[in-house]
Every structure is written in structure tokens, then in C-alpha cells.
Amino acid sequence: MSLSGRYGAELLVRVSAGRWRRWLVGGAAVVVLVFVYLARGSVLSSLGALLIVDTVGPSADYLVPLGGDAETRPFAAAKLHADGVAPSVLLFEYELTEASRLGVALSQTELYRRVLEIQGVPAEAIRVLPGTVRNTWEEAQSLKRFLSTQTSAGVVIVTSSPHTRRAYWSFRRSLQDLPVEIWMAPVRRPGIDETNWWHDDAMTLVYLRESFKLPFYWVRYAF
Amino acid sequence: MPSSVGRSTYVSKRLRRWLLIAIVACPLVLWRPVLAGVQGFMAVSDPIEASDFILPLYHNVDAISEAAADLYARQLAPRLLLHRVESSRLEEVGLVSPTHVSWRRLLEARGVQGDAIETPVEVIRDQVELGRWLGRLAIESGPIRILVVTSAPRSRLSRNTLSEGLLQAATDADMEAPPVELLLYPVAPRGVERSAWWRSRLGWIAYFDAYCLWLIQFLR
């Protein structure tokens, strides 16, 4: 059937306008993609920086290294202790692995304690909070129980840099009813930080994981 | 009466609407097979046969050491191969033993005889290098079959990286393929149900990590 008359002309204009709109949207998408690709270093750096909270500064009462990375976090806590940032270190109790149950490996809590002592933190300055914890949220709840008996306190949370945003949110949310000030001390691995994380597979995985865990925490623990 | 152009636009709109409904409805109805498929793609396994070595990969200490010791107890291989990795900061301050020593202790505690565990002297940085080392071993000593005990979510990645190393060894020796047969034995990480991995937080993390690593390797 041939197109003729007013109806056909209108239809032709509408079809051609729709095609132009599709071309424009497609073109814009290509331009955006090309721009993101060319500026990928800056884009990925900015995305990495969004996950990091760095507020350590004034002296506090407690240093709180979070579990999950005995290679860096207790070492950083010991350094902050030596720098006079806080006089005490609080540790959490973690679930035992089978290797530690069989006596062939130290438990994570014991490992943290030994690192701190070897790095010069006196044994009497280290305190282990009671109750087993499994994740960041449970660590925040454990600290809340401990601090609920105190009139006021300042805590420095020591954790890996991409984990700081989620940890800060969890601790702020858990301790919101208490007179507690929270500062964050991000720990960076030598040679890898928010400006180059995508060059290393393991670090890329950590940043990606945190990008998903953060919104998950917002949804899971917001109410 | 609508023209043929009008009718085709109407049909395509209808088709698009149905497609959208189907896309939304599919995961709602088929979520279980879809999630099983997510696991099935990453967890590759081979039929188990008597082998020369059991090679536990250092993914999930508890589950993999238990499975390796179990395969040894079932006499599926007379020897276990451990490998040295780069030393960690905790090792340097004397708080933990080298990884292969910890694994040896753990395997012995699970009933593996000490003299059945072999550890080559080379320090191996990643799985490609491990595959390359296995390839060289087979080229020097003759055909070998190895039971690779790996974490289920990482088994596809393990096969890819080990195979890449084997091919590199073959290329170095001007061969088409090294005389190594790898049999993958995937083990569910502790706390993750193999047939219902989505029920645990650890399961989500394990498969998320595996897919991300797979994608990263593909893009690199």
C-alpha cells in the first residue's frame, strides 16, 4: 500500500523524527563511552576515592583495628599508637578457623594481639572485647556495647582504605545514640592506592566488592 | 485502515512489551535454575581417577585441606604436591610459618603421612607459574596425572590459568602440549552449600569474586 495524503505525510515525519532521536541518543552514548575510555584513569581514581574516608587527626581514646587483614591493619594500629594517636587498642573476637582449632595456626584475634605486641604496644594497652563477631556491622555492635557504659569517647577505626566508607557508615549508624566521636584511619598497601587500584587484580576485586557491599549495607542495616 | 508501516510499528511495540514481560518474569519463575547455572558455569569438575599427585590450591584452607586429605585416604594418589609462595609480612616478623609449612602441618593433622608430601624449592607467584612448573615437571619426568583440589567458585579460573602455564611450558620445550592431565576436583567453600550457594553470604561473595576475576582476566 502506498503512502498518500495527510496521514501518510504525518507518519513519514514521525518515523523520521523517531529515527533522528535514536541516532542522537546513540551518538551521545558513543561520545560518553569514548570520553569515559579516554579519561578512564581519572574516572576510576574518582570512583576509588569515593570509597575512602580519611579523618584521622586529633588524639582519641581507642584505636580499633578491624578484622580481615592481619597483614596491614594491626601494623597500622601499632604505628598510630606509637605516634600517640590513642593510648589503648581494642580488638574483637573472631570465629576460629579449623586450622586454629587443630592448633596449626593462630586465631585472628591472637594474631592481631601478637603483631601489636611485637610492634611495641604494651600488653596492658590491648583489650579484647567479648563476643564473637563475623562482619563489620557486628564489630560496630560489639563496640557499641563496650562504649555504652562510658560518658564519652573518641575512637579511631583502622581499616583498609576501600573499606573505610562502609565501616564509617556502620560505626556512625551503630553509635549514633552515644557521645562518641569517630575518626577513620585508612590503611593503604604499599604501591597500591585509589589512584592505581585497577592495575592489580586482587585490589580491583576489593574495590568492586566494596562498591556492592556499601549499598547492600545501606539497605540491610538502614532501618 | 492503518498502513503497513503503522502495522509493523504496532507489532514491534507489542513484541517489545512481551519481550520486556518475559525478561522480568523469567528470573522470577526460573530463579533457582538460573542461580544453579551461575554456579554450574564456574564450578568445573572432571571424573576422578587414580593419579600421580594431589595438588591442593591455596584457596580455602579448611575445605580444600580436608578434601585433599580425604582423596589421599581413599588412595587416589600416593603423593601430595605443595608449592612455596612469596613470604608475607606476618611471616617476616615470625608470627606465621611459610604457607607450605602451615599446609603441611594441617595435612599431617588430617592424617596425611609427612613423607607423602612434596614441596619443590621454587617460589611460585601465581597459578600460571604453577602450571608452567607442572608442565616442566612432566616434560622432565614423563606423563603425569594430577588431581587438582580447588574451590568450586574458582575451579574454572584454576583450569584456565593452569592450562595457560602448561601451554607456556610446552612452547618453551617446542612441544604442542605437555604430557599432563589435570583432573579438577572442586570443593564448596566452608559454610557454602554447593546446591544452594545463594543461601549464605559467603556464597554470594565467593561467586561474585569468581565472576569478577573471570571478567578481569578476560578484559586483560
Image: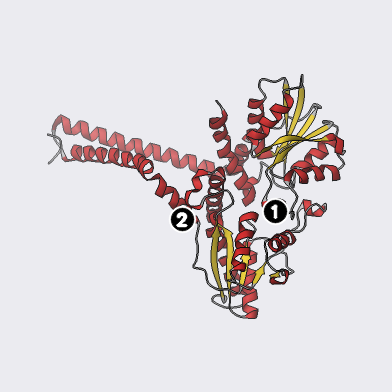
Judged from the image, the secondary structure of the residue bearing numbered disc 1 is: helix
In the image, A117: left or right of B82? right
Res B69 → quadrant: bottom right
Q: Nearer the viewer, residue B65 or B45?
A: B65
Q: Please state the horizontal and vertical placement of residue A175, each as a whole percent of the image.
A: 67, 24
Q: Nearer the viewer, mark 2 or mark 1?
A: 1
Residue under the point 19% across and 37% down? B6
Q: Is residue A82 visible?
A: no
In the image, A23: left or right of A112? left
Q: Nearer the viewer, residue A16 or B35?
A: B35
Q: Please state the horizontal and vertical placement of residue A112, each as a whole percent of the image.
A: 77, 43
Compared to residue A132, the image places residue B219 above or below, namely below
In the picture, which quadrant includes the C terminus of chain A?
top right
Chain letter for mark 1: A
Residues tagged by mark 2 and mark 1 found on one chain of the structure: no
Q: Please state the horizontal and vertical placement of residue A22, each as a whole percent of the image.
A: 35, 38
Chain letter for mark 2: B
Q: Amino acid at mark 1?
A: Ala
Marks 2 and 1, how far apart at CA = 29 Å
Q: Amino acid at mark 2?
A: Gly
Res B135 → quadrant: bottom right
Residue under the point 32% across and 42% down? B22
| Location of mark 2 (residue) | B40
| Location of mark 1 (residue) | A99
Q: Nearer the viewer, residue A214 or A108?
A: A108
**Few, some or many residues within 10 Å of mark 1 (<14, 14–19, 20+):** many
In the image, B110: left or right of B28? right
Judged from the image, the secondary structure of the residue bearing numbered disc 2 is: helix
